[in-house]
Each structure stands twice: as C-alpha cells, then as structure tokens.
Amino acid sequence: MNLLQTIRTAIRALRRNLKRSFLTTLGIIIGVSAVIAMVAIGEGAKVRVAETFASMGTNLLIVLSGTTTAGGTRGGYGSMPTITWDDMKAIQSEISTVRYVAPVMRTGTQIIGENQNWSTVVYGTTPDYFAIRDWKAASGALFTKSEVDAGTKVLVIGQTVSDNLFGPDVDPVGRTVRINKIPFQIIGLLEKKGQSPVGQDYDDTAFMPDKVFVAKIQGGLQQFIAGSLMVSATSAEATARAQRLITLLLRERHRIHAGMDDDFSIRNLTEVAAAMESSTKTLTTLLASIAAVSLLVGGIGIMNIMLVSVTERTREIGLRMAIGATPGNILTQFLVEALTLSTAGGIVGVALGVATADWLAAYMKWPLLIRPDIIVIAVGFSALVGVSFGLYPAYVASRLDPIEALRYE
C-alpha cells in the first residue's frame, strides 16, 4: 500500500463519521479562531493607541514652568512662570534635534458670532503648533509668521466651534466674531481631530497668534510665557536626546547649579505612547496564550477520539495487516486522519476568527489588522497539535497483533 492509497483510506474513514469528525475538530476550530481574533483586536488596539498619540503630536515633549509654595501649600508644575520667550528661541536655535517649538497659552472664554455665542478654549500660539500636531486647515488657511509678527487679529477655529456658531455644513472662513468685545476674522477651519483618550473634544477650540493673545486676551507676564512649550523632536529616536539637551540648556540659562532641583518639568509623550503600546502588546500576548490553550484541549479531544476509533476498527486493522498492510501503513493512516482533522479545523478556525475579529472591530470601532504570519502559525500549530496527539493512537494501532485483531469482537 503506497502513501496515496493510505491517504485515501484515511479520508474515507473520516467521511464515514462526518458528525464525529466535526465534533472532534471543534476544539481546534475554537482555539484557532480565538487566537486569530484576539491577535487581530490586539493589533488594532496598538494602532488605535498610535493614532491617539499621533493626534496629540509627533515626537512630542511638553516643557512646563516651575511650582509655587505658599503657606506650606505647593502648586503644580506651571503655577510659577519660569520659562521665558528667550528660552523658547534658544531651544529652537541651539538644539539640533529639535524641529519645532511653539508656545501654548490658553484660556476659556466666550466667542460671539453673528447670531450665536459659544464658550470654548482659546489658544495663543504660533504656526509651528499646527506643524507639531500635523493639523491642517479643512477650509481657508492657518495664520502665518508674518501675521503673528504683525499682531493681526485673526482666528482659526475647530469644527465644533464652527457648528455651534454658524451651524453645520457652513464655511466660517471670512466671517467675523468677537472675543472680549474685540473683533477677529476667521481665516481657517481646522480638520476634524475627534476626541482625546479622556473624552476631550479636540475640535472644540480656537487659535490665534500668540502676540494678539498676550496683548488682547490674557495679558502678558513680560518676558515669561504664561503657559507651556510644545516641542517636536526631529525623530522618535531623537526625542530622548532632545529632552536631555533641553534640560541642560534650561538649567544653564536659569543658573541652576549641580544638586539643585529644576525649576521646570519636561514630559516625554513618546515614552508614554511606547509604554501604552508595550502594555497593549503584553495584553495581546496574554489573550493569545489563553486562546492557544483551547488548541491543546482540542488536541486532547483528537487523541481521545482516535483511541476510540482504534478500538472500534480493531478487526479492520487486523484485516488490513492480514492482506499485506505493514505497521508503518497503519501508523501513517491514523496520523493522516489526525492531521486532516486538525488542519481542517485550523482552516475553518481561521475563517471564523477573521469574521469574529471583523465583527468585534466594527462593534468597538477599532481598526482591524489581520496578521498573515499569525494565520500561518495558527494553522501550522493546529497541524502540529494533530500530529502530536494523534501519534500515540496511531502507534497503538500499528502495534496490534493481526491474529488477535481478527478475533476481536
């Protein structure tokens, strides 16, 4: 009996008990589909984390001023202005790993339109802010450096502000609004950014040149910035180096000697993003590992059914040996049966896993990311499980004594 005949014989044996064969593969199907779905959702979660931090800005550092102490009560970072406009210029000009630097000053205020008004957050900044956050204008244009230097009273608003002041599907560019009774012309409508991880609406905001903000809205602190600095490094790899160089530069400029605490704080959002991505990856691995356990359970099911099959087909095995089948032929036949069951279960499990991942992604509104390598590994592992757990029943079948097998009732 050659290998092809052995394979045909094994497949015929499985087809005689289709219901039992399906139930035997069910554990493999569930295991493979769970692995595919969990990994796909986990990869989608990683993409969502990356998108969330990308919406905040790329390779981002936040430089905050110092703290205050009054009556034993300490204020948080930013409560004592220590960062100056000259500090900002020095960071931009003296540190090669810094691409953009922008001041971020904010206040909550009322914007009055033609027939409506809306309370929102107004920021004073420079054009570099939009470059850092990769935020473009959906309509009109962003303000330029010349408009900043000239102190032009212009405004760029988010979609939420526009909808509440002028209604949806209305282009606000060219319209005039008032803030603190001062007229501002809207020159740009920003692209939609959506919400932050904590539910903040990025589109419920308005931006104006920093000089106008200081002069007309918040008031100035002379050489100090009444807010923070947003810094973008030249690359993700250069972010940590930029942080170290900014720290050294500010300590030198603020005359902070060795052993003294900094009068500023630098937050590296790239590290936060990396930590969250690492946590998501760990969780994905854990879920996939738990799902893989069901593959082992499915393998045990295959072994049990194959042992039952050996017992049921003892006379058949004896007859095959009597007409010339070798122990190797019997071993191969039962291994092929186990391999066929596990591989078929793996293929069905892949289809079910992809469908489940697609449904979960649509339900949770996460991106779906199917990894082909995981599909190959899952199917290969299911085949390995089938062979591993089918080896013992196949060995038992191949060691039967033909005469005793023929006598078996």
Image (cartoon, rainbow, N blue to C red):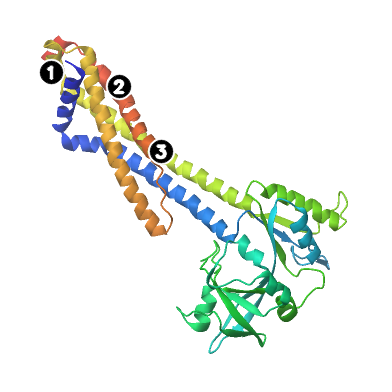
Residue 346 sits above or below residue 68 on the image: above
Q: Is residue 16 above or below residue 360?
A: above
Q: Nearer the viewer, residue 27 or 116?
A: 116
Tag 3 secondary structure: helix
Going from the N terminus, do you reach mark 2 or mark 3 first? Answer: 3
Q: Does residue 140 appear in the picture of this structure?
A: yes
Q: Nearer the viewer, mark 3 or mark 1?
A: 3
Q: Which mark is residue 391?
A: 2
Which residue is pictured at 71% across the width and 80% down the height? Answer: 217
Camera-side residue: 150 or 267?
A: 150
- Which residue is painted at 21% across and 21% down in the image? 333
Q: Residue 373 shows which numbered tag?
A: 3
Q: Residue 27, can we see it?
A: no
Say if mark 2 contacts mark 3, CB within 8 Å.
Answer: no
Image coordinates for residue 366, horizontal then vertical, percent: 43, 56
Q: Residues within 10 Å of mark 2 (few under 14, many from 20)?
A: many
Give the distance between the C-alpha atoms of the residues marked 2 and 1, in whole angstroms. 20 Å
**Quarter of the image that includes the N terminus:** top left
**Place of residue 69 in the rendered image (x, y in percent of width and height, measured from the top left):** 82, 65
Three-letter code, disc 3 = Asp
**What residue is at 88 percent from the left and 56 percent from the top?**
255
Q: Label 1: which residue?
A: 315
Q: Nearer the viewer, mark 2 or mark 3?
A: 3
> Regarding mark 1 in the picture, which secondary structure is present there?
helix
Please name which of the two marks, 2 or 1, marks the residue nearer to the observer. Answer: 2
